[in-house]
Image (cartoon, rainbow, N blue to C red):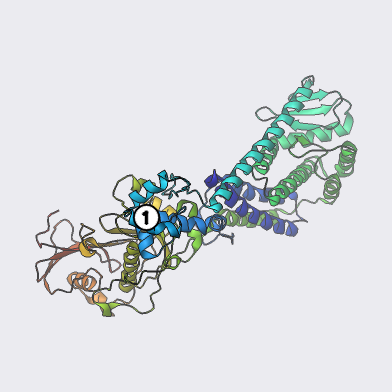
Amino acid sequence: MSALFLKVFNMAMTAGYCVLAVLLLRLFLRRFPKIYSYVLWSVVCFRLVCPVSFHSPFSLVRIDPQVISRDLIAGEEKRDAAAELFGYSAALKKGAALPYGVTAEESAALQKDGVKTQEDAKLRSDTAPGRNPVTVTFGTGGKEAGGSPAVLLLSAAGWIWITVALLLLFCHFWQLLRLKRQLAGAKAVGEHIYEAEDLQTPFAAGIFAPRIYLPASLFGRERRYVLAHERTHIRRRDYLVKQTAFALACVYWFHPLIWLAFYLMCRDMEMSCDECVIREMGAEVKREYSASLLSLASGRQILAGSPLAFGAGGVRARIINVLSYRRPGRKAGVLLAVLLAAILAGLSLNPAVKADERSAMTPVDLVIRSAADMTMAPDLEMPALEPAEKHRPGFKEPVLHLYVPESTMETGYVDLTGMPQEEYEVYAVQALRELYDLTGTQIEECCYFYYDTGSYVFALTKDDMDHGREFYMRSYSERVDEKFWGIESIYLTYAGNVWYSPVYQYELPADFDTYDDEEKAVWFLTNSGAYNGRQIQQCFRPYDDMPETWRIIMDDDTAYELTLDTKINAVTNLTGPYPDSDIRH
């Protein structure tokens, strides 16, 4: 429920921004036909209905679609989830925050009793009285973290939201059922036209087979104007628009701008319908039509969410609009329509995602943590690249977000208890430092996770990670005290080839284009973090059917393989050193 409420809340905030934009545009359109203002509200409906949108630099939205969720679950939930993830022993040893429910006084007893692993600690936490352990969320299908005040408050808000929304929708449907019973005795007087006794206001109602209901006392010109008005509503499917808009207002009841949007949308709907009737029947009926509006609306109360009543929607403003209505010229109408279409498209798009924008993260599905969240232990130092003189100046330590896609968790190759989280993050930072040294690309913030084979996977956003859009993989293999058992490798997706990658080549040698492919392969190896510093004995193409692949054998009989993309002067994959030059695949 918390995740659903956060999604609804975020959508409401973005839709509220669009409401403000539409209100501003309506000021500039006040002298134009109301059909333009009416159409503008479609972008608000889109934002309230569609949970996803495309990212584009042409977006007119200037707020973070996820900023509310990040603010709501920051703080205690982040600290508790991180502590549970690291395990009790890591938290006690490295000075990290203890898991929720464990006091500092109990820590000594835990160590004394032999609590050394996350499994031992979790068993103690689950079985001890008064414990409230945290469950870390992985992927979109994980369970919510619980126990912290922020999460409990969020959960309570979610239940309040759904309760009020269902109550409002129930009352609305009950009102419609009562109206249907009251009209049960209406008599058919034409195709989809019914007359009812004691009916004060004509209106159109229905969903699949809409009907027009008229007071039995309605005759003459007023009857003709009313029928023209209501038939226009039915032709434009306004009866469906109004009911949908009211249902959305009930769902987003907590946002006052949504109710304001509903009210103004109904006014624009009625005014644009009036204009359509005047356009069809001629400007000479303006006064009589206005008189009919005034006559049928006097003393009548129209409730929000009610069917399309002829006298509803601010009669005074409607009469003024009818009397002042002038049809715009063809060229002006087309130009305005094109301009508004561009604005609607801009408001429908989300801002483009950049590596340095925190909006790329969705904390409800992440264990949020950055290097600044915890103090590094004095004995845990950043491993140095070989050779150290290859470091570029100006590297900034990135903000990292540990995120494991649900599909990856199911493979069984991710083990978060192998060593403390701080130590894993050190190597993640090193991997991004190597990327910076090799390509000049500074990653300021991204998602990552690590396999128990020592491979680190990096993507800009949670969504990118879920859909396999990783821009960088780095495996450290046996370099980390034999905790890993794979072969070292570096895999890059270059922005020259792949749209979601931020990685470009920078500062290649000035004469790099004059290198042959063998020289390029050697240059990339000796300038990468995987290079072991040994002398190169041989460089050749090992596979006839893969001319882009090169094998480089060192003087200690270790070997590397790498893949060149000569079109953009880049290396996309580098693996090694293999322990034997006779590489078996």
Residue at (69%, 37%) from the top-left corner? Answer: 168
Query: In the figure, residue 542 lies in which quadrant?
Result: bottom left
Residue 227 x %, y % = 79, 32
Q: Amino acid at mark 1?
A: Leu
Residue 453 x %, y % = 25, 55
Q: Label 1, on which residue?
A: 110
Q: Determine whether, in the image, residue 409 is placed left or right of residue 16.
A: left
Residue 318 x %, y % = 83, 46
Residue at (61%, 40%) from the top-left corner? Answer: 162
**The N terminus lies in which quarter of the figure?**
top right
Within-10-Å neighbours for mark 1: few <14, some 14–19, many 20+: some
**Does any portion of residue 283 appear in the rendered image?**
yes
Depth order, front residue of 240/372: 372
Secondary structure at badge 1 equals helix
Count of marks overlaid on the render: 1
Query: In the figure, residue 245 lies in which quadrant?
Result: top right
Q: Determine whether, in the image, residue 68 is placed left or right of residue 310.
A: left
**Does any portion of residue 459 appear in the rendered image?**
no
Q: Determine whether, in the image, residue 208 is placed left or right of residue 65.
A: right
Residue at (71%, 49%) from the top-left corner? Answer: 261
Depth order, front residue of 269/582: 582
Residue 473 x %, y % = 30, 60
Depth order, front residue of 149/49: 149
Residue at (68%, 36%) from the top-left corner? Answer: 167
- The vertical placement of 49 against 329, above or below, is above
